[in-house]
C-alpha cells in the first residue's frame, strides 16, 4: 500500500486525549445573522501527539481552538457535534465541569504575547494564580514548581523574571511565561494558537522548540495551530489542513508533506520556499479564502483550484479515506490516481 | 515618581496666580464695595471712607492685588470683614467639616457606583443593565439642591428619621483634635458618638454622592466592557480561575485607570456640589462660609476660600496621580526618571 511504510511511526491513537467528531461552528453576529464558520470537522489527538492544524487566515483555526476550551460565550458561538475529552463532551459541558479542566487538564497559549498577560500583575502572581486555582501543588511546592517551569522554558534567572511585569519582558519572554503557565499543572492537552506568529523570526524557532521539547518530555498532546506549513512540519506528528472552515486533508505529517493529496495542500507546499521547484513561481496561491457568509454547494476551494472540474461545483464532496489519511476532494492527487 | 509629583505641585503656583487675579478683578468690578455693604445705613460718608482707607479699598486694584500676593505667600489673607478674624484661621477651622463630608460622599459614590457599573457591564443588554442605566441618568440629571431639599422635607421633616442640619446636636461635646468628627470620636474612643455623627452625615453625603454615582457607574460600565475584550481576560478564563477572581483581580484593576480619571474630573462637580449641599444642610464647612462671605461681599474671606478650594482641587489631582502610580506599573516605569 502506498502509505504502509509510515504507519509504524504513528503514535497509538486508540485512546485519544481529544476527539473531535462532526464539529460545526456557527457565529451569531451582532446584527442577528448566524454564520457557519466550520463544517463537519473530525480529528483526534492521542497522548504525546503533536497535532498541527494548518490553514490560511480566516479559515477557522482560532474558533476551533476556542470551541474546545469553550472560551467563546454560547450566545456568540454555537457548537454542533462532539468534542470528547476523557469522559466529557466539551461541546455540551457546563461551566461547572469546564472550569476545573481549564488551566489544569487543558491549557492554551495565544497568538499575541503582548496582550495575553495581565499588565498590572507580576509574572509571579500570574503563575501563582493558576497553581492556586487547581490545588495540585501546595505550600512551598508551589514556588518550587514555578521556578522549575521558568527554568524549563529557558529562563536563566527565574527569580528575576518572577518579579517582572509583562511590559518589562520581550515578546518571546512573555510567550515563554505563557508556556510556563500553561504547563505548570501538568495538563494532558496543550492548545497553542499561532504562538509564534507575532514573534521575531529568530525567536519563533526557539519558542516552537521549547513547546515541542516540553510536550515530548511531559507526554503532552498538543494541538498546534499555524498558518505556516513550513513551520510545523518538522515537529508535527499529524497535520490537518483547514480551508474555509473545512478540513481538506488529514494524516501523518511526513506523508502529507511528501505526498500531498489535496490540491490545496499541494499549493500550500509549493509556497514553502525551500521546497519550491526551481523556476516555479514564488507567489502564494491566487485568490482568497471564501467568506463565511458565502457557503455554496460543492468544494470550498473550487475558485482557486487548478484541478477544478464540474463535479467540484455540486453536491457534497466525498471524504476519501486511505488508511490514516483522508482527503476531501473529488480528484485527490496521489490517492486519487489509484482509484 | 517623586519628581513627577513635585512638578505637579509646582504647577499649583501659576494656577493660583490666575485664579486669584481673575477673582480680584471680578469682585472689584461689581458696583458697590464691602464698606458700602457692611457699614450701617446711617453711617456718614466720612466713616465709610475711613473704613475704605483702613482696608485699602481706596487703592488701585492692581496695587491691592500686589499687596494681597505679598501677604498670601505668608498665608496671610487678611481679616474677614464680617467676622473680624484671621481668614486663614477661619478656613483651617472649617476645612475638616468640608473634607469629611466630601470624602465620605466620594467613598459612598464609589462603593455604590463601581459595583453597579460592573454589574451593568457583565449583564450588558439585559433589563438589569437598562435599570442601572436609568438610575445613572437620574443621578446625573437630578439637581443637587433639589434632591437635598426633598430629602430634608421627607426624611427629616416628614418622617423624622435623620437630622437635617449641622454636624452634631447642641450640647454634645467632642474633643477637637483633627476636626474630622468621625476621626475625633475614634481618637477619643467615644464609639457611642459614631452613630450620632454618622446620622448627621448620611443625608448630605447621600445627596452629594447621588450625582457622582451616575457618572462613575457609566464610566465603570464602559471601562469594564472594554477590558473584558482584552486577551488577558481570555487567558484568565483559560486558566480556570473562578469568575469572582477574574472580576476582582483582572477586570476591575485594569478598569481602574479610567475610573480614577473620571473621579478626578468629577472633583469640580464634587466641590461645587459640596458648597450647595453644605448650604442646604447647614453643614458648617467651607461651603457655607463661602456662601455667607459672598452674600456680604467679604472680599478677603471669599478670596481665601477660593484659594483653599483651588489648592484642594490640585492636591486631590496629585493624589490621583499617586493612585495611578500605585495601580499601573507601566505608568511607574514611564515616570521613573
Ligand atoms: N463575531 C464574528 N462575526 C462574524 N464573523 C466572525 C466572527 N468571529 C469570527 N468570524 C469569522 O470566522 C472565521 C474564522 O475565524 P478564526 O479567527 O477562527 O480564523 P483563523 O483561522 O484563526 O484566522 P487567523 O489566522 O487570522 O487567526 C473568519 O472568517 C472570521 O471572519
Ligand atoms: S474537489 Fe475539485 S475543486 Fe475541490 S480541491 Fe478537489 S479538485 Fe479542486
Ligand atoms: Mg486565529
Image: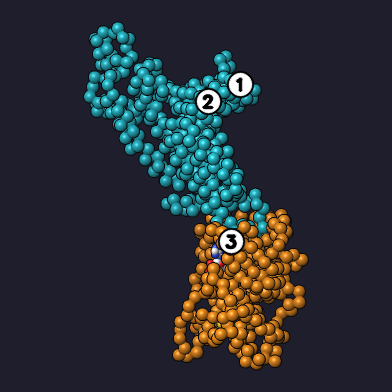
Chain colours: A orange, B cyan
Q: For marks 1 and 3, give the CA distance.
A: 53 Å
Q: Residue at x 58, y 76 (%)?
A: A297
- Tag of residue A165: none
Chain name for mark 3: A
Residue B80, position as x, y percentages in the image: 37, 19
Quick check: is the Cβ at mark 1 less than 8 Å away from ligand 1? no
In the picture, residue B27 is in which quadrant? top left
- Tag of residue B159: 1
Q: Is residue A278 left or right of residue B170?
A: left
Quick one: label 3, few (<14), some, or many (20+) residues within 10 Å? some
Q: Residue at x 25, y 26 (%)?
A: B61
Q: Nearer the viewer, residue B109 or A36?
A: A36
Q: For marks 3 and 2, give the CA distance.
A: 48 Å
In the picture, residue B184 is in which quadrant? top right
Question: Given contact means CB atoms under 8 Å apart, are the residues at marks 1 and 3 in contact?
Answer: no
Q: Quadrant of ligand 2?
A: bottom right
Q: Circle 1 sits in a helix, a strand or a loop, which is it?
A: loop
Q: For marks 2 and 1, give the CA distance.
A: 12 Å
Q: Is residue A217 visible?
A: no
Question: Given contact means CB atoms under 8 Å apart, are the residues at marks 3 and 2 in contact?
Answer: no
Residue A273, position as x, y percentages in the image: 49, 83
Front disc: 1 or 3? 3
Q: Label 3, on which residue?
A: A28
Front disc: 3 or 2? 3
Residue A117, position as x, y percentages in the image: 56, 59
Q: Nearer the viewer, residue A90 or A167?
A: A90
- Tag of residue B150: 2
Amino acid at each position: 500500500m502506498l502509505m504502509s511504510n509510515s504507519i509504524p511511526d504513528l503514535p497509538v491513537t486508540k485512546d485519544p486525549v481529544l476527539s473531535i467528531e462532526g464539529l460545526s461552528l456557527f457565529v451569531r453576529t451582532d446584527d442577528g445573522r448566524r454564520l457557519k464558520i466550520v463544517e463537519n470537522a473530525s480529528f483526534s489527538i492521542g497522548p504525546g501527539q503533536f497535532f498541527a492544524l494548518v490553514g490560511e487566515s480566516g479559515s477557522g483555526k482560532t474558533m476551533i481552538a476556542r470551541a474546545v476550551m469553550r472560551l467563546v460565550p454560547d450566545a456568540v458561538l454555537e457548537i454542533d457535534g462532539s468534542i470528547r475529552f476523557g469522559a466529557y463532551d466539551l461541546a455540551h459541558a457546563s461551566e461547572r465541569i469546564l472550569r476545573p479542566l481549564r488551566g489544569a487538564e487543558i491549557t492554551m497559549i495565544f497568538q499575541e504575547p503582548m496582550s495575553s498577560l495581565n499588565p498590572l500583575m507580576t509574572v509571579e502572581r500570574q503563575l501563582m494564580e493558576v497553581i492556586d486555582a487547581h490545588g495540585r501543588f501546595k505550600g512551598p511546592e508551589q514556588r518550587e514548581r514555578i521556578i522549575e517551569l521558568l527554568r524549563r522554558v529557558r529562563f536563566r534567572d527565574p527569580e528575576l523574571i518572577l518579579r517582572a511585569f509583562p511590559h518589562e519582558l520581550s515578546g518571546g519572554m512573555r510567550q515563554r511565561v505563557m508556556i510556563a503557565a500553561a504547563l505548570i499543572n501538568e495538563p494532558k492537552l496543550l492548545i497553542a494558537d499561532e504562538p509564534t506568529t507575532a514573534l521575531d523570526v529568530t525567536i519563533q524557532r526557539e519558542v516552537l522548540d521549547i513547546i515541542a521539547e516540553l510536550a515530548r518530555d511531559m507526554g503532552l498532546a498538543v494541538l498546534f495551530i499555524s498558518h505556516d506549513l513550513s513551520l510545523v512540519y518538522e515537529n508535527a506528528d499529524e497535520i490537518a489542513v483547514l480551508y474555509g472552515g473545512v478540513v481538506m486533508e488529514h494524516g501523518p505529517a511526513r506523508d502529507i508533506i511528501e505526498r500531498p493529496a489535496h490540491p490545496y495542500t499541494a499549493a500550500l507546499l509549493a509556497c514553502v520556499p525551500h521546497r519550491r521547484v526551481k523556476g516555479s513561481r514564488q507567489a502564494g496561491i491566487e485568490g482568497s479564502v471564501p467568506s463565511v457568509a458565502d457557503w455554496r454547494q460543492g468544494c470550498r476551494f473550487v475558485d482557486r483550484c487548478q484541478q477544478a472540474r464540474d463535479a467540484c461545483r455540486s453536491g457534497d464532496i466525498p471524504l476519501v479515506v486511505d488508511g490514516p489519511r483522508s482527503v476531501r476532494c473529488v480528484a485527490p492527487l496521489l490517492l486519487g490516481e489509484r482509484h | 515618581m517623586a519628581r513627577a509629583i513635585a512638578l505637579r505641585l509646582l504647577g499649583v503656583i501659576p494656577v493660583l496666580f490666575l485664579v486669584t487675579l481673575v477673582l480680584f478683578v471680578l469682585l472689584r468690578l461689581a458696583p458697590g464695595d464691602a464698606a458700602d455693604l457692611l457699614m450701617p445705613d446711617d453711617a456718614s460718608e466720612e466713616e465709610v471712607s475711613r473704613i475704605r482707607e483702613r482696608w485699602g479699598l481706596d487703592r488701585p486694584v492692581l496695587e491691592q492685588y500686589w499687596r494681597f500676593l505679598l501677604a498670601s505667600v505668608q498665608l496671610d489673607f487678611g481679616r474677614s470683614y464680617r467676622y473680624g478674624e484671621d481668614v486663614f484661621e477661619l478656613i483651617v477651622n472649617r476645612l475638616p467639616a468640608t473634607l469629611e463630608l466630601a470624602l465620605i460622599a466620594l467613598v459612598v459614590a464609589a462603593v455604590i457606583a463601581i459595583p453597579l457599573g460592573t454589574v451593568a457591564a457583565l449583564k450588558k443588554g439585559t433589563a438589569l443593565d437598562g435599570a442601572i442605566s436609568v438610575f445613572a441618568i437620574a443621578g446625573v440629571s437630578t439637581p443637587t439642591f433639589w434632591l437635598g431639599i426633598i430629602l430634608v422635607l421627607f426624611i427629616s421633616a416628614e418622617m423624622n428619621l435623620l437630622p437635617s442640619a449641622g454636624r452634631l446636636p447642641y450640647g454634645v461635646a467632642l474633643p477637637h483634635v483633627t476636626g474630622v468628627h468621625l476621626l475625633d470620636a475614634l481618637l477619643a474612643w467615644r464609639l457611642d458618638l459614631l452613630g450620632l455623627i454618622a446620622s448627621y452625615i448620611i443625608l448630605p453625603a447621600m445627596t452629594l454622592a447621588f450625582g457622582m454615582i451616575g457618572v462613575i457607574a457609566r464610566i465603570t460600565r464602559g471601562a469594564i466592557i472594554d477590558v473584558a475584550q482584552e486577551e488577558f481576560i481570555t487567558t484568565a478564563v483559560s486558566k480556570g480561575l473562578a469568575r469572582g477572581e477574574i472580576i476582582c483581580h483582572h477586570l476591575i484593576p485594569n478598569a481602574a485607570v479610567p475610573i480614577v480619571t473620571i473621579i478626578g474630573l468629577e472633583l469640580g462637580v464634587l466641590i461645587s456640589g459640596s458648597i450647595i449641599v453644605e448650604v442646604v444642610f447647614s453643614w458648617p464647612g467651607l461651603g457655607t462660609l463661602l456662601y455667607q462671605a459672598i452674600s456680604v461681599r467679604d472680599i478677603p474671606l471669599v478670596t481665601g476660600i477660593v484659594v483653599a478650594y483651588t489648592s484642594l482641587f490640585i492636591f486631590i489631582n496629585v493624589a490621583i496621580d499617586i493612585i495611578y502610580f500605585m495601580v499601573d506599573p507601566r505608568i511607574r516605569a514611564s515616570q521613573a526618571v
